[in-house]
Each structure stands twice: as structure tokens, then as C-alpha cells.
Image (tube, coloured by chain):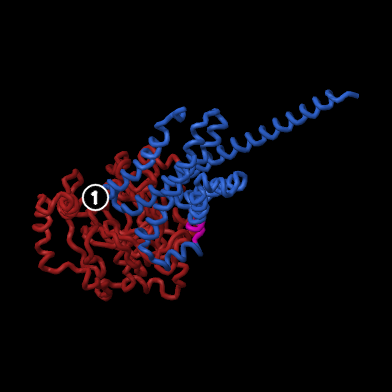
Chain colours: A blue, B red
Amino acid sequence: MPPRRPPLPWLKPGLFAGALIPLGVLVWRAAHRTLGADAIAIGLNQLGYLALVFLMASLACTPLKILTGWTWPIRVRRMLGLFAFFYASLHLLTYVGIDQQLDWAVLWGDVTHRKFMIVGFLAFLCLAPLAWTSTDASVRRLGFARWKSLHRLAYVAGVLAVVHFIWRVKSDVRVPMTWAAILAALFLIRIADSVRTRRRKRARELVAARSVDVGTPG
Amino acid sequence: MHLLENRGFVHPHASEITPRDAYLRRRELLARFATGAAGLALAGWAGREALAQTTRPNKLAALPGARSAVAGAVTMEKPTAYVDVTGYNNFYEFGTDKTDPAANSGTLKTRPWTIAVDGLVKKPLTVDIDQLLKWFPLEERIYRMRCVEAWSMVIPWMGFPLGDFIRRVEPLGSAKYVAFQTLLDPKQMPLQRTHILEWPYVEGLRMDEATHPLTLLVAGLYGKALPNQNGAPLRLVVPWKYGFKGIKSIVKISFVDKQPKTTWSIEGPSEYGFYANVNPAVSHPRWSQATERRVGEFERRKTLPFNGYGDEVAQLYAGLDPKTLY
């Protein structure tokens, strides 16, 4: 029997290519010196923003499935998360290597004194083990339950990333607060869903218990 | 604080000075680059450089003015390209992105424009900008500009010393500070409809800072009238302080006896002080101030105390703890 073709065969390759387009544009503009006056700062900000967008997209997969019943978001969740880590890594490398040019005194000051830098770095540190354990083999090795609880770190990373963004802007927090609201909405959907699931489970157990009672001869 | 006594001058490193020979031939060289002889990639770069050094083909009026003779007023460093000086701005009344002011400040009407002078002053008055610009000869001064966000530029400003203006309007002996106010008009300055800052933008200087020969009221840059995004028609420039002290589009100058409120210290008192003197030793809570990137350059450079104007201005702060001067 030939292997069944999965639905939406273009989904993953399409996403993969699409996720690299912003990087391509960034590199092209950097090479042509059209990024603007302070190109390094602009590139740095764009990479950080891309990391946030992909992280949020990966966090939106499960809530989207809950709301719509679609299963395709779950199939791209891993790729979205890995792109979040990819752009977060480029963001960090750009800061360390290009923006600060390996000025270790400044970088040490960042991670010891500046909470804005610390939360950003912690967000990256949350993502790293998730990228490392993103393979099917890791799921098997850790066992699904443990793997799942480890990967809840993605939500921690999301919160830290949004805080990092809020603290980054000087006064106009409208855009980062929008992301905070989106993150809160994603949380709410998951909480509501888990409450509902638990309630249903309990109801089923009650029904089952009652039917056992009824079925038992007095 | 007489001009002639103050002979302090910050000498650039020898390595920063273009050899005289190359300097004299720079236009020829740049022109050759720009014609494409040096290849497409180089032409783009050189064209941009060349553009920065030639008269701009825009509608802004030319402002005549002589080079300033004040000590420290003309740095030998290479001016930042005109496109960057006028395309990379913080002017939150028009947007918080660096490119927003250039894109959105067309709504600002800079004529007619008046500046009110009030408070502890012998001659309270309201003066039209065109009349005011005839009071004093304009000087060209090439100043370093260090933004609190750790980037910097070198800008050829056209203006006159604030001290000359102050002496003309004659503040009372009780005046200890000068307070400045930007236009408040949400129709012309759209972001004033939001609450991202307390409007109007206000700034202030101690009287001795305000009358220092380096403190400038500016009406132009690169030999032309100020573009709106740079604070037309009149702005403040205080080269030893972080850029946010340079209040733009001024409509009111008041003489007061108490330290005036300043916009950024209202917004974040722990991050932005009244003095805001450039100080590499005092970090901003979110980033180090030890180094800066000159717009258009790749390598970071060390930030200098008082932005390199210490010889001229450090004595203003003798006896004050420099850590309080952020």
C-alpha cells in the first residue's frame, strides 16, 4: 500500500520558505545599505521582533486548535518554535558580536545589572533546551509527560520576551502591550479549555459511577 | 565666562584627521566615485557621502552665516550625512520610530511663528521668528550630538548663542533657571493626541548653563533652514548634554526661580535627570553609556565626559557630585 499523502502537503515547505523571507529582506537591505541611518540598531530590533512573532505564533497553535478544531497548526508548531529560537539566536549574536563588538565589560554589566537585558537573556535561555529537545527522539527519550511539562517553558519565554520588549521602548508601550494582551488571550483560552476538559472528565466519571450503581443488583 | 578667556579645545586624535592632501581633493574623489568608476556598490556609498557635502536640492531657504570663533564650537570631525541627520530623529510629537518625524512632520506650520518670553524678565515680549532671526548674526557650529540611546552624530548647526538672546531680554536677578516649551497643537503634532509623554514637551537649563557660550538657539543645519523633523523653526542645542535636552519647535522661553520640570524626568525620573550631562561613568538603567556608535560608522567609540566639551563646561559643575548629573 502506498503511503498516504498527508493533507496540505505544501504547508511545511511553504512555512519554511516564508519564515526565511524576512531574513532575506534584512540581509538584502543590509548589503545595499538601505536599512537606515543606524542599520545595526534597526537590524537588531527587527531580529528581536521576528523572534517574538514566531514565538507567539508557536504559542498560538494549541489555542487555535482548541478554538477551531483544526489540526494543521499542531503540525507546524515545532517549526514555528524552532524559527523563534533561530531568530532569537541571531538577535543575541547580533547584539553581542556586531552591536557591542564583544565588549565583555558592557556585556557582563548587562547580565548582572540591567533587568531589561536579563529578562531578554533568560527568554533565550528558556528557548535553548526546547530547541535541543525538539526532535521526536527526545520526546521518546523523555517520555511524553515530562517532555510536555518541559515545553511549557515556551510560555515562560513568551512572558519574558514581552517584558523585555515593554522595557525596551522608552515611553510608547502600545505595540508591546498589544503583544502582552495577545499572550494573555492565549493563556485564557488554554485555561478555559483545561477547566472545561476537567469538568467533562468529572461529569463522565459521575455518569459512569451512577450507571455502575444502577447496574448493580440491589 | 568670557569667550576670549576660554581657550579650551578638544583635539581630535591624529588618526582621525584626514590628510590635508586627501581633504583638498575629496570632492574630486567623491565625484569620481559617484560617476561609477569605483563600481556600483561604492557608487551608492560615495553618492550618499557626496550628497551630504553638497548643497541640498530641496526647498529649504539658505541661511547665511559665518563659522563660529567660540572655543570648541567647531569640531574637526566629519559631519554626519545630511540624509541621516534629517532622516533619523527622535521627535515623539510625530511618532516614536526614528523615521517617523521625517515622514510625518509635514503637518507642522512654521510660519507665522512667534516665541513668547515671560516670567522673571524685564521685557516680557512675544517676537516673530523672522524678526528674532534678524536680532543676531547666525553662526555655523559643528557639534557632536550624543543621544541618550548611545548613538551620536556630528552636525553643522546654524544658530546664535542663547546667552546673547538672554542678555537682550534682560532677566531679573531673581531668575535662576530658563524653561522652554514646545508648541502644543495636536492638529499639527498628531502624537500629542496620545499620552506617551506629558505634552507639551518642556525642558530647562540653569542660568549659567543657558548663558554658556556653547549653548545655542538653532534655526538651521547644513547651511539651510531647519527641516521640520529637526525642530523647525527654532530649537535648543546643548552639546555637552544628551540630545533630549535639545527641545524642538520652541514657542515659549520663561525665566523662573525654581528648577523647572523637564519632560523626560517626568516620564522616568530614575532614567533621565534634569542635568543629563553626557557621562560615560553613569549607566542608563537599561544600557551602558560607556560607548556610542556614530551614525554611519561600524565600530563603537568611547563616550567622552561632557561629550568631549569638558574643558569648556566642567567648571560649571565644580563641587557637584558627577553621579547626580545624569
Compare residues A16 and B221 and report the one nearer the observer. Answer: A16
Q: Which residue is mark 1?
A: B83
Identify the residue at the far right of this view.
Answer: A218
Q: Position of residue B118 (x, y in %)?
A: 39, 53
Q: Quadrant of residue A54?
A: top left
Numbered disc 1: secondary structure: helix
Does A15 appear above or below A140? above
| First to last magenta residue range | A114-118
Q: Is residue A93 left or right of residue A158?
A: left
Q: Quadrant of residue B222?
A: bottom left
Name the chain letter of the residue that bears numbered label 1. B
Q: Position of residue B4 (x, y in %)?
A: 24, 74
Name which residue lies at 29% across and 57% down. Answer: B295
Q: How many marks?
A: 1
Q: Position of residue A173 (x, y in %)?
A: 47, 46
Name which residue lies at 37% across and 41% down. Answer: B189
